[in-house]
Amino acid sequence: MYKYRMRLKQFVEAPIEDYTTLSDRPDSKPGDSSSISKDRQAFAKRSSSFTDKRDRILSTNPKAVQQLKKKWARIGEEVYVYVVNTKEARNHTEVGVVDREWLEKNMPAVAPHIPEHEDGITILYTNNKGAEKVPMTPWIMAHRLAHAMARMTGMSGNRTISEYSEAERSINEVVNTILQDEYGYRGPTKRGSYRDEREAQSFRRFEILRRKFFEEIGTFRSARNKKLREDFEFLNEVIAQYIITGKITFNPIPQKIVLKKAWGNDADGVRLRGDPDDANQMLDTLSRDLEYYIENMFSQSIGRIFVM
């Protein structure tokens, strides 16, 4: 099924079906749906849940909206985006998957303006709390959707599954094996699995090692600029890359991973010990596996509402 979907996706692109901005009046009452406006000029002027002016401008600029539609065209599913700048949206960030009952209870003024899209994916952006550092670009919107998908589960037979968790597991298995076999890391690879303070320090070093490794193999901007915030953000950036480009690509494993510099010189790090061919093959396989997992995430998202 996965391979069939991937081949189909190469020929069929489904752009964002609808993009809507919703904002409320300064004097609006809680739950008053009549106070909600779809006017983009009103959205740009009001600071309810979107407090950064840059985000309001990006969310309403016709060229920026067209760029979002163009960059998200490779998803392969119908997507409905609502950017919600209201008082009742302030306290709902990266909630994940919700149903109509949740929407009507927690965002009663907005709920009547969100149609049911049984054959598509509905996404509500309620704010951008990282706006002081990163404006709400198409990439950031894709990254934040990945965070919401981390909270989504599906069913396989009688077993509850999370494609996001399966993707994390695959990353951990491959990367941990490479760091141990090719770079000689010896120590705990799971939080809390250490026996003493020495092993605890070893694990903290391992987290840095993973992040630095991800920055070497990643081909997206945060990796190229060596600004991946945490090692766990790697998967969210990979999902964003797949949404924007339609594929996942990794660099070959590096000859060395520098953990710390002092006076311009490498003060701490590890070096590749053997032939990298097997490790690079593992990364190639991982990239294909992650594409399948992400495709399945979107398949499971049809008919669902995401709030972030």
Image (tube, grey):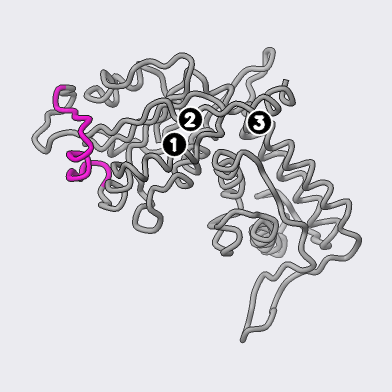
- Mark 2 touching mark 3, by CB under 8 A? no
- Residue at label 3? 10
Q: Secondary structure at mark 1?
A: helix
In the picture, the disc for residue 15 is 2
Locate the N terminus by quadrant.
top right
Q: Earlier in the sequence, mark 1 or mark 3?
A: 3
Distance between mark 2 and mark 3 Cα atoms: 14 Å
Amino acid type, label 2: Pro
> In the visual, does 76 lie left or right of 6?
left
Whether residue 279 is situated above or below residue 30 in the rendered picture: below
Residue 46's place in the image compared with 133, above or below, is above
Residue at the location (77% across, 59% down)?
253
Q: Is residue 164 left or right of residue 84?
A: right
Image position of 234 (left or right of 107): right
Determine if the magenta segment contains residue 21. Answer: no
Residue at mark 1: 69
User: Which quadrant is the C terminus positioned in?
Assistant: top left
